[in-house]
Image: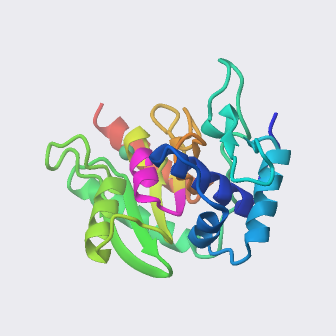
Amino acid sequence: MPQALTEREQQVLDYVVEYLQRNSFQPSIREIGRALGIRSTRSVSHLLGVLSEKGWIARDKPRSRGIRLLPVALGETEPGVSVGPGPDFEEQQPGDAMWMQRALEQARAAVLVDEVPVGAVLVHGDRLICEAYNLTRTIADPTVHAEMVVMRAAAARLGTNRLVDATLYVTLEPCAMCAGAVVLAKVTRVVYGASDPKTGMCGSLGCIAQDRRLNHRARITRGVLAGPSGDLLRDFFVARR
Ligand code: ZN
């Protein structure tokens, strides 16, 4: 069983995995250092040594560039054997409740137009970039979940397809599509309210946003204003039964 990695070690492993998926040759120590802003080649070598000791990579020739990814680094494992820790939930942070309150206001606004009450807010640094509610009923499109709407709008507004340093606040746990988009957009953090045992893919049915086989993992905090977020959805569906 491989040992847990520090954030820095994980970054090196992610870079090497990503690099080897793009190239048939290995990254040099210098390339790894440059990509991750590590000045000393000795530090990079040391980190690779740690990855090897912790059971994530093998170094065929310790003094050369020889890096071989062990299957576990690619998330490959025997059926039924889980790799690494499960979803890793972070504690709520200052400001989370305030932004979630804003997402909740969006969800409440959705009810007024007979839309499924899920609201989302995207924050970049400390700045609100956009907020939205679900639009699936309004425009008859199954893909316009609140998260998708804010991620698209934020990317357009920021002029980039990578929402690095962004936090996505959403009143309901993201589904497979939205969690997938979080990975594609490289959203740094996801904070959600109510868990969704039927379609949630950020902890309930699985955790796409932290799947080690993918090239990005988001930090996740759950349960922020979960009560009112869940009540709003329950009331909405009860009223329409
Ligand atoms: Zn979704």
Front position in the image: 232 or 123: 123
Query: For the point 54% across and 44% down, which residue is it?
Result: 202
Front position in the image: 202 or 45: 45
Query: For the point 66% across and 32% down, which residue is it?
Result: 71
Seen in the picture, residue 216 relative to 97 is either above or below; the reply is: above
Q: Specify whether 238 is left or right of 60.
A: left
Residue 53, given in percent of the width and then of the height, sits at 85, 46
Q: Which residues are magenta?
A: 179-191
Determine if the magenta segment contains residue 41: no
Q: Visible in this render: residue 232?
A: yes
Query: For the point 39% across and 61% down, which residue is it?
Result: 120
Front position in the image: 83 or 40: 40
Q: Visible in this render: residue 223?
A: no
Residue 130, given in percent of the width and then of the height, sits at 33, 72
Residue 236, given in percent of the width and then of the height, sits at 34, 44
Q: Specify whether 17 is left or right of 167.
A: right
- Pick out the residue farthest to the bottom: 127
Q: Quadrant of the N terminus?
A: top right
Q: Quadrant of the C terminus?
A: top left
Residue 207, given in percent of the width and then of the height, sits at 56, 40
Seen in the picture, residue 99 relative to 236 is either above or below; the reply is: below
Query: For the point 69% across and 47% down, which residue is it?
Result: 66
